[in-house]
Amino acid sequence: MQRLEIKGGKKISGIINISGSKNATLPILASTILTDKKVLITNVPIVKDVETMVDLLQAMGSNIKFDKKNKKVLIKNKKKLSTFASYSMLKTMRAGVLVLGPLLAKYGFAKVSLPGGCAIGSRPINLHLDALKKMGANIKIKDGYIIASAKKGLSGCSIKFKKISVGATENILIAACFAKGLTKLSNCALEPEIQDLITFLKKLGCRIKWKKKRNLEIYGMQNLKSALHKVIFDRIEAGTYIIASALTNGVLKIKNIDTSIMSAEINLLKKSGVKIVNKKNYVLVSCKKKLKSLNIVTKPYPGFPTDLQAQIMVLMTKAQGVSEIKENIFENRFMHVSELRRMGAHIDIKGNTEKILGKRQLNGAELMETDLRASVSLVLAGLVASNKTILNRVYHLDRGYEKIEKKLTNCGAQIKRLK
Ligand code: EPZ
């Protein structure tokens, strides 16, 4: 089991290039099931979850090539794909459930492993399944699998999501692209990764329109085109490195970032005292002032992203006074708190609200990683802690951060991977 060793106290200064978005790449790859034309996807992040999605599509018979050196994925599906997605493929990556919608829409059948919960919550998929049933699917759950059929194919209809869900919006949006007739979706998620998926689907020839704020209209098409698509940058990776620089009082140039889709997080960080300036082709981050405490509430986009909650908590351990973070998206996204407490952080949890006492010097410790974003928050804590921090179960980190120790080491961090 690989581990990371971090020697704290170094400033994070220099240049970091942001990779493509994992959470845009995964639904885009799943949606390629719809077409048998050539598809080239570029700016793909080299992270474990993307490799797992490529392996899943390959196992289903997709003619997919992952050119890691050039960060490209080339797909040219010819033959009918298998409609089976096994537990062994999905057990490490819940987003594999995003093949359900396209398989059902294209082939009228799918047997997909029911994604389990994970460290941050039970992660149900009732919204996905209810919507597919409304589109004409017959769905059974048997032996841990979703067995879905739609002999006459899926039909367009009006669907209002009872709750805003990124995955449900993506799964049904992709399915509706191949369904018969018009599908009207309301109460959709608006994350930039969904917008990137829509951009890709439109390049395939899909007819998709945003109506009112959270309403989509999709007209099903059966004959799709080839497409070339560059994946959007990863805004959560970008937010993580902005925080890394602010935490360590460094001066960081961040490239391949568009702050216009990061307003909630940028405005909050500036309010706390982080200096974030848009230059010609990079964003300059510095933090000379004492950090002010913040009150943060995680919300669906365009609110503050839940995927940055653990990271900004580490920053608040340095702020003046008491900060408060309310986690509104997932019921158990506090796995990082117990590990941060072991480093000397003073954090109280009441329900879904955490109170963080500032001006705490963190001390290095041996820690356990539990999920992707909790893991990266422990890396941030290690960067600013006195003496050495050892992180176990680094595979959690490798699921969503491309070359993190290289990017940080190039900016002054002392991190090494222990076999
Ligand atoms: C996506 O997960 C992201 N994953 C998550 O990022 C992100 O935290 C989350 O959206 C919220 O922004 C990918 O894009 C691969 P949801 P998803 O459906 O789609 C409840 C990371 O770190 N819900 O928007 O699974 C659910 O329990 C990951 O990169 C239902 O109740 O999230 C949660 O409370 C972690 N029924 C809320 O909705 C459903 O059918 C939001 O979940 C579906 C969801």
Image (cartoon, rainbow, N blue to C red):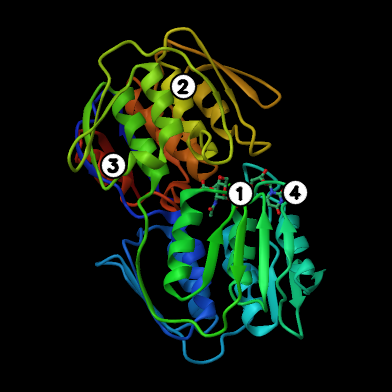
* Element marked by disc 1: loop
| Disc assigned to residue 343 | 2
**Where residue 74 appears, x then y in whole percent?**
36, 77
Secondary structure of residue under mark 3: strand
Query: Between disc 3 and disc 1, whose residue precedes?
Result: 1
Quickly name the residue at label 1: 214
Horizontal relation, residue 380 to residue 197: left or right: left
Question: What is the CA distance from the residue labelled 2 to the residue labelled 1?
Answer: 42 Å
Residue 162 is marked as 4
Height in image: 191 above or below 90?
A: above
Q: Left or right? Give the position of 371 relative to 154.
A: left
Q: Residue furthest bottom?
A: 79
Q: How many marks?
A: 4
Residue density around tag 3, few if under 14, some if 14–19, many if 20 or more, within 10 Å: some
Name which residue type carries label 1. Arg
Q: Residue at x 28, y 38 (%)?
A: 415
Q: Type of residue at label 2?
A: Met
Disc number for residue 416:
3
Marks 3 and 4, the one that precedes in the sequence: 4
Q: Residues within 10 Å of mark 2 (few under 14, many from 20)?
A: many
Instruction: Give the residue at x 76% y 74%.
Output: 147
Q: Nearer the viewer, mark 3 or mark 4?
A: 4
| Callout 2: SS | loop
Do the CB atoms of the residues marked 2 and 1 lie less than 8 Å apart? no
Contact check, label 3 and label 1, Cβ < 8 Å: no
* Of pointers 4 and 1, the one earlier in the residue sequence: 4
Q: Residue furthest top?
A: 321
Dot 2 or dot 1, earlier in sequence: 1
**Amino acid type of disc 4?**
Lys
Between disc 2 and disc 4, the foreground one is 4
Question: Real-space Cα distance between discs 4 and 1?
Answer: 12 Å
Q: Position of residue 260 (x, y in %)?
A: 37, 40
